[in-house]
Amino acid sequence: MMPTEENGYVNYLMTFGLVLGSIIGSIVGIFINNLLLGIVAGIVSGYALGALVYFLAVKKELKDKE
C-alpha cells in the first residue's frame, strides 16, 4: 500500500503503536515495579494493534479496488 493523501497515516500506524506502547508500558512498568516487563508488553501490544489496523485498512483498500 503506497502512501497517498487519503491513507498516509495508515502507513505509520505500526511505528506509532511501538512508540505509544513503549511510553504507556514505561508508565505501567513503574507502577508494577517491573519496568522492563511493562515496556516489552507495551511495545508488543502497540505493534499488534498497529499491525491489525494496518492490515484491515489494506484489506479494505484491496476490496474497494475490485
Image: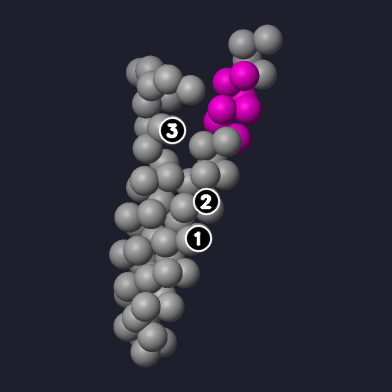
Q: Is residue 60 magenta?
A: yes
x then y, percent, for residue 20 = 35, 57
Query: In the picture provided, is 45 more to the left or to the right than 13?
Result: right
Image coords of residue 15 (percent x, y): 36, 46
Question: Could one spot residue 28 in this view of the protein?
Answer: no
Give the label on residue 49, or none.
2
Q: Residues within 10 Å of mark 3 (few under 14, many from 20)?
A: many
Q: Which residue is mark 1?
A: 45
Q: Secondary structure at mark 2?
A: helix
Pointer 2 with pointer 3, Cβ within 8 A: no
| Residue at point 41%, 41% (across, down) | 13
Do tag 3 and tag 1 residues touch (Cβ < 8 Å)?
no
Determine whether 27 is above or below 17 in the image: below
**For residue 15, which numbered disc appears in the image?**
none
For disc 3, the marked residue is 10
Give the residue type at disc 3.
Answer: Val
Q: Residue at x 52, y 37 (%)?
A: 54
Other-residue count near label 2 (Cα within 10 Å), few / some / many at <14 / 14–19 / ≥20: some
How far across and how far down the image is residue 32, in percent? 41, 87
Stretch in magenta: 56-62
**In which image quadrant can residue 43 be found?**
bottom left
Kindly check if marks 2 and 1 are in contact, taking CB atoms under 8 A apart as contact.
yes
